[in-house]
Amino acid sequence: MKFIKTPVTGMQDFLPADMTLRRHVLGLIRDTYLSCGFHEIETPVVEHIENLTGKMGGENEKLIFKVLKRGAELERGLKTGELADSGLRYDLTLPLSRYYANNRNDLPSPFKALQIGNVFRADRPQKGRFRQFTQCDIDIIGDESNLAEIELISATTQALVRIFSEAGISGFTVHINDRRILKAMAIAAGFSEEQLPDVYVTLDKLDKIGEDGVKRDLLDQGFDENCAARIMELLAARESAKSVREFIANGLAETIEDGVAENLDHIMETARLLIDPSVNLTFDPTLVRGMGYYTGTIFEISIDRFRSSIAGGGRYDKMIGNFSGQDAPACGFSIGFERIVTILRDSGFMPEEAGEKKAYLVDKKAGDETMRRVLQQAAAERREGGTVAVEVLKKNAKFQVEMLEKNGYTKIQKVYADTVL
Amino acid sequence: MKFIKTPVTGMQDFLPADMTLRRHVLGLIRDTYLSCGFHEIETPVVEHIENLTGKMGGENEKLIFKVLKRGAELERGLKTGELADSGLRYDLTLPLSRYYANNRNDLPSPFKALQIGNVFRADRPQKGRFRQFTQCDIDIIGDESNLAEIELISATTQALVRIFSEAGISGFTVHINDRRILKAMAIAAGFSEEQLPDVYVTLDKLDKIGEDGVKRDLLDQGFDENCAARIMELLAARESAKSVREFIANGLAETIEDGVAENLDHIMETARLLIDPSVNLTFDPTLVRGMGYYTGTIFEISIDRFRSSIAGGGRYDKMIGNFSGQDAPACGFSIGFERIVTILRDSGFMPEEAGEKKAYLVDKKAGDETMRRVLQQAAAERREGGTVAVEVLKKNAKFQVEMLEKNGYTKIQKVYADTVL
């Protein structure tokens, strides 16, 4: 039998120092969200295959880890699709929708949910992208008003400011848009309904390939030259527009739904009163967000210094209805926990540990009675809240001491038969 | 497309109140173990199929959820066993052994590991037994002395006493044995090496079916009558023996390895000095523990009032060598977290929440300005550490208020246009 000592491809073993950082960041996130009235819940990591492949996950549905049906190996001649009856969740939003449909009678209304958990995607492994990773989501279900958006933006920015301020990192931008504005732009530019998904995907690249790049990309895909020129023109107005209303007034008045601009302006004005002054909040009509289930407002937070998106979300009013037949308005914001931890670690940040860590290294020759004295002393110190390790002094004491120091032990005492504790 | 709103068979959705209890208990466990010098680590929930099916998991290997190899559905004519290249871990000990083999140069020595995580078993679902459940393990790797056993017993009992004392529940018994004593008994009674596993399985039932039951069971399996009688005779001495040495002296002196009895007596004597006086510690030569990988000391903690085992573990000195070719002494103790939570919930225990929880329910007709005032007030109160929810006052205010109260909100204020905050 051959045993394999590395983790499965794309997944991670976390060392003690990694865990100290992860635990610290999760603690800040949880504290902040609980203080804003969110309720923590948990769903299984395994989900029905029918739910995972129900066209709600966009590109992520290609990346599902499927779990073999029990006994399926034994049956011969199973057809494709019959081998797996469940799979590992690719996000926390789909399980939340199922959960809400299943438990709504036992939940507050509106329901403000906090979920912290692992999700799985069989992505091509690369730096900072993993096949098992942690997400931290907050969602508000049952509130059709924009209070949901305001509370989500306010809570998420507060969590991020708390996390990064400790590491001396500041400067975030909240990008905000509405799916209906994207649609109004594309329709006003002359694109057809069927062309919308491809147009969105191209617009989404704007910050990477620039305006010329987007235009060229649209033409390369065979879209009409006039439509391409027109959408770029509409977009150009974003620089000078002082509000979403002003942006809309410039050529979108006929294709936009009533109230969309006013709603977005209201969210932005109110959120600005609540969030940390260091956080920039900006209307960004090029923001797309990948998931197909968004129906209204969408948002993303980037960290200015690293030009890196660290949170994203939006409104998805139609998803829960898929499970219960009964629609419920819903809006969520997800923190990219792994990216945050990577940025903090790369910047050299480590949280300060509370209290002194102490280790007794007991010489073997000191005898049983000495060891007992040390253990009783350690038990008393632990009861008083101290962190105390007791170890047999190793022959290679140097490595033993170094490793303890590396893990935050500042008081290390070698104990011999005649040592006074 | 059909969506399913219940969780996958045997897995659980946790409601906010469940999570409050779970988080509280996990917090006590983590705090206690960290104070005893354990380092928290994490391993992926997905593990190589070669490792999971390597005969280290005993009966659990029959219960593995296998993960379909990416692309395997597309290939036709795959043989049994080629469909899955990974699976969900059935415990935390196997991944820890792989982890240690993979990371030993970056870890303290001895390495005191704490793992809290989900494991998966395709068991027949029944009350209190789930297909995804949380385990809390501590392990000490690299310490061949019985300091490892002493520290594990002392830390685990301390965690349990802390958890249950809050709920007014006390009375635990630590059962302790050594695999080598089991073997010495069976060999002395005349059983052969090959018969040992079946004999162990039968002895393990003693507390359920009694001495007569065990004897009958042995005979039913076709074992020799003299052997059966002799092992029952050897076992009977456990009632009167005042120490493991005394028990061994009564017929096992020739089949036992040197030092086993002294080692166990020493562990018990020292542990008694360290553990809470309410905890009973007893030598139990009928204790077997299911896993095949144990090589020496084994132990289990039961809660007297419920006659229920809530923690178990032992020494497994040969497992890590499977991964690295280099043996490392290892010993671990695992808390049955789900059982603890079930006992606490059934006894009506709920942790007290820190601080007051406050909710503002804002009437829609109160207008945007009122809502902004409330949100700013809430933001200020949250910054000062308060838990504050802001919601739109629903038509069905009664249900809204009831649900908030159920979730610990004690101060609920309805806000209208003229309300003074």
Image: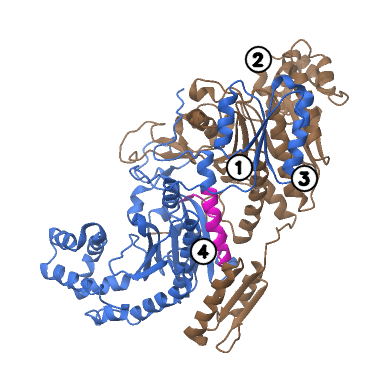
Chain colours: A brown, B blue
Chain to which mark 3 belongs: A
Q: Which residue is mark 1?
A: A135
Task: Please say if the residues under marks 3 and 2 sit with CB atoms less than 8 Å apart.
Answer: no
Task: Please say if the residues under marks 4 and 1 sit with CB atoms less than 8 Å apart.
Answer: no
Q: Quadrant of residue B171?
A: bottom left
Q: Nearer the viewer, residue B234 or A197?
A: B234
Q: Nearer the viewer, residue B381 or A210?
A: B381
Residue A306 numbered tag = 3
Dot 3 alpha-carbon crowd within 10 angstroms: few under 14, some 14 to 19, many 20 or more? few
Reply above or below: B407 against B29: above
B31 inside magenta stretch: yes
Of badges 2 and 4, nearer the viewer stands 4
Residue segment shown in magenta = B22-47
User: Callout 1, which amino acid?
Assistant: Gln
Residue A335 numbered tag = none
Chain to which mark 4 belongs: B
Q: Which residue is mark 2?
A: A193
Query: Same subunit under labels 3 and 2?
Result: yes
Tag 1 or tag 2, which sits nearer the N-term?
A: 1
Of badges 2 and 1, nearer the viewer stands 1
Disc 1 is placed on an element classified as strand
Most extreme residue toward the left, as rendered?
A: B225
In the rendered image, the quadrant that contains the C terminus of chain B is: top right
Q: Residue at x 23, y 69 (%)?
A: B193
Q: Which residue is mark 4?
A: B100
User: Callout 2, which amino acid?
Assistant: Glu
User: Callout 3, which amino acid?
Assistant: Phe
Disc 2 is placed on an element classified as helix
